[in-house]
Amino acid sequence: MIRRRLPADSGQAFPIYIMVVGGLLFLAFAYLAVGQAAANRNGAQTAADAAALAAAQERRDQLSGAWVEHLLEPEKWHEIFDGMAEGLTPACWRAEQLAANNDATVLNCSADGLLGHTVEVQTNKTVGDSIVPGTETKRSRATATAVIEPRCSFQLLGTDEDADVEHELPTLNCEGGFDWELDPETPKDSLPKPEDLFDVHLAD
């Protein structure tokens, strides 16, 4: 016997089709919301990294300037390479600049010891509207720490009665096999640059 398919069969399938399509749309919007949140968090971390590096680089430049200023006083070099020098000024203004360039705001910036800075930022943009309630006002936060590491070592000259060391300066032995033979007559534009003296990188 041939059984005819009743029109009601196709009518029952239509609601199921609507439910399946609705479920797929919900999943699509949920993945979009997750992607929006991830992008916002990534933006916050990028801003925090840049801000922390900028603050540390500003401090590095100040230390390098102090080294040049005290070039003829090598007994002060160790303190400078350890992060201590007279006249150092706050460096967090550079963190604020870089955070603003990445559409974020610095919530906190502080020196992490003598040779580092830790910065916390918050994105200016919210995650945005999505199916997840409350995201329209949610901003992402991130924290980063950048550290400064001396790239050079040296030995203070001893007091040898048979040698005139009064006007001699120690040799800087720097990473990469660079040795800087210095003397009081070395022109300033020939002296090591900040990046030659100190390395700046994000903390692990």
Image (cartoon, rainbow, N blue to C red):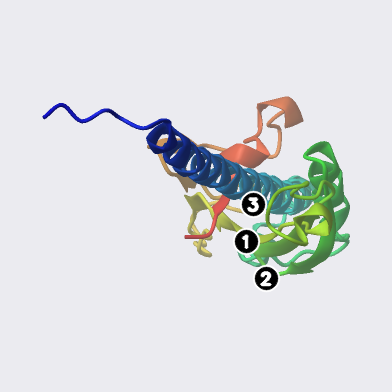
Tell me the crowding category of disc 2: few under 14, some 14 to 19, or many 20 or more residues within 10 angstroms, Cα based: some
**Dot 1 corresponds to which residue?**
145
Residue at the (49%, 62%) spot, across then down: 160
In front of the other: 132 or 58: 132
Q: Say which label, 1 or 2, has the lower sequence index.
A: 2
Residue 183 visible in image: no
Q: Nearer the viewer, residue 29 or 39?
A: 29
- Disc 1 is placed on an element classified as strand
Residue beneath label 3, please?
41
Would residue 159 be found to the left or right of residue 129 on screen?
A: left
**Which residue corresponds to mark 2?**
112
**Amino acid type, residue under disc 2 in the picture:** Asp
44 shown above or below 4: below
Disc 2 to disc 3, how far (Cα)? 23 Å
Toward the viewer: 145 or 150?
A: 145
Mark 3 and mark 1 lie on one chain; the one further toward the N terminus is: 3
Badge count:
3
Q: Give the percent coordinates (x, y) of residue 36.
A: 65, 44
Amino acid of disc 3: Arg
Mark whose residue sits in front, 1 or 2: 1
Percent position (x, y) of residue 189? Answer: 73, 26
